[in-house]
Amino acid sequence: MKLRQFSSVSLLVLSAWTGTSGVAGADTVIYDSASVVEGQQGFVEPFEITTPGTLTITISNIPWLDVVTDLTSFLSTSSGVIGTTMYSAGTESVSVGPGTFYAHWFGNAQGTYNEGVVGIDIQFQPSFSTVPLPASLLLLLSGLGFLALWRPRRRL
């Protein structure tokens, strides 16, 4: 019997020690891929966003085969370019509202193989406030306390 009470108290202390209440943030990866550029080539990726937030595009030059030069990327809508145009590898963040957007990137792979690789990562972070996680430590402790005190009835 004492072993059962000791294990229950140990679980309560352990859960109080490790229990934390955090905040849940939700990033959405819209596009994450590598594009093989053959000579002079461009790419477009359309996507739709339903809530306001921050759109982040990251372009990286992957050193495989030939290096892609004149690497250019930008974001646009049907009414024009949004944010700034990047003329090299890097990251650009833009605050956007709901709508259809287009990510454009292009470059020039000239060299021995006439091919190069560009990495593209597009992420979206909604602008609404983060959702706090419930204080589940109190619920956990009360449940463990209930289990520690609960004893099944014995049938005679």
Image: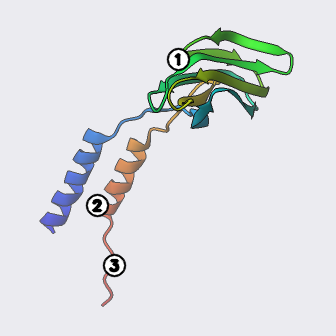
Q: Are marks 2 and 3 in contact (CB under 8 Å)?
A: no
Classed neighbour count for the residue bearing mark 2: other residues with Cα under 10 Å, few (<14), some (14–19), many (≥20) = some
Secondary structure type for disc 1: loop
**Any mark on residue 153, and which?**
3
Q: Amino acid at mark 3?
A: Arg
Q: Is residue 1 visible?
A: yes
Residue 12 pos. (x, y %): 26, 49
Q: Distance between the Cα atoms at labels 2 and 1?
A: 59 Å
Q: Nearer the viewer, residue 142 or 87?
A: 87
Residue 76 pos. (x, y %): 76, 19
Q: Distance between the Cα atoms at labels 1 and 3?
A: 70 Å
Residue 14 pos. (x, y %): 23, 46
Q: Amino acid at mark 2?
A: Ala
**Any mark on residue 148, and which?**
2
- Answer left or right for 24 relative to 102: left
Q: Nearer the viewer, residue 41 or 131?
A: 41
Q: Residue furthest front?
A: 112
Q: Is residue 127 visible?
A: no
**Residue at 36%, 36% in the rendered image:** 20
**Residue at 70%, 24% in the rendered image:** 104
**Any mark on residue 89, and which?**
1
Secondary structure type for disc 3: loop
Residue 69 figure quarter: top right
